[in-house]
Image: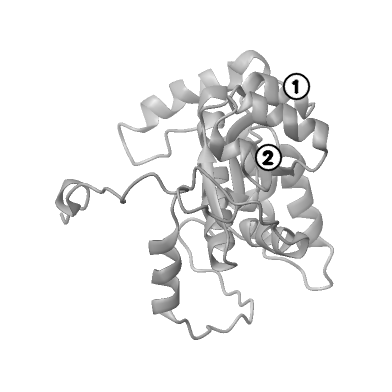
Amino acid sequence: MVDIFKDELNLSSNEPDVNINKEEFIKVINSRRSVRVYTNEKVKEEDILSCLKLGLLAPNSSNLQPWEFYWVRSENKKNKLVEYCLNQPAARTAAELIVCVAKPMAWKKNKKKMLDLITKNDKKPPEAVVNYYKKIVPLAYNQGIFGIRGFIKSIIIFFISFFRPIPREPVSFADMKVWSQKTTALACQNLMLSFRAFGYDTCPMEGIDSYRIKKLLKLSNTDQICMVISVGKRAKNGVYGKRIRFDDEDFIHQV
């Protein structure tokens, strides 16, 4: 039997490599700043939709895509959202606001979508891939009622770990929140870099009332607000200071 973790699968997506202009990418990275004040210039609707779609191309765990993005267009909701972002200039002066939501419990629905997609083709999918979504994914992400299943998993993992390496998480709903937040944050970075490449600026905001925002968007109790991203064109006073980064050696280690 093929082990999806150890064996190389004989698959090909026929997706060729492309030439990349690294200087342009470096320009995007270096010019992305958290902008606190925007001009009155509008953001084109087609650009917002394009950037949102690019955000969804971010890497994510098991392709389960545990995220949702709410482009708040209603004037009433937008005013409320600005209030729930503590009326900070980055929200108040922005042309657009996007709420980025991590969904820890989306794995079950999206697992089924993945199975439906890979099995509906005429070509029979690899058994290892089907088994991964049918068996491994539920084993990893299902924490059970009141987290009992996750607790039992944590005990089993503890003893197995004495004999071989083994994934330690997720074994609780808290772990599931971390899992979905990590993946959603990757998409948020994709989104912000996309807006910069399109000539716009952004600011990721965590100084927010997440409870009120969840109520505003009618989200479930398990959904998590990852961040709110404001979008627009930077004003002259939009960037509050020079970018400060500590020494590379403090963070980059070669071992």
Q: Is residue 67 visible?
A: no
Give residue 106's position: percent from left, percent from top.
70, 37
Which image quadrant is residue 77 in? top right
| Closer to the camera in the image, 68 or 238 | 238
Residue occupying the point 38% across, 32% down: 160
Q: Nearer the viewer, residue 184 or 156?
A: 184
The kind of secondary structure element at disc 1 is helix
The x and y percentages for residue 184 are: 57, 44
Q: Amino acid at mark 1?
A: Lys
Earlier in the chain: of badge 2 and badge 1, it is 2
Between label 2 and label 1, give the one nearer the viewer: 1
The answer to which quarter of the image holds residue 85 is: top right
Q: Can I make out residue 33 in this image?
A: yes
Numbered label tally: 2
- Looking at the image, what colour scheme do you see? one colour
Residue 81 location (% of width, % of height)? 69, 30
- Asked whether 172 or 241 is in front, the reply is 241
Which numbered circle lies on residue 107? 2
Left/right placement of residue 154 relative to residue 61 reads left
Q: Label 2 sits on what residue type?
A: Trp
Residue at 35% across / 33% down in the picture? 161
- Element class at badge 2: helix
Q: Residue at x 34, y 41 (%)?
A: 165
Q: Which residue in the structure is indicated by mark 1?
A: 215
The picture places residue 156, in percent across and down from the top left corner, at 45, 25
Left or right of 171, for residue 167: left
Q: Tell me how far mark 2 sits from mark 1, CA to CA.
A: 22 Å
Say which of 95 and 104 sits in front. Answer: 95
Disc marking residue 143:
none
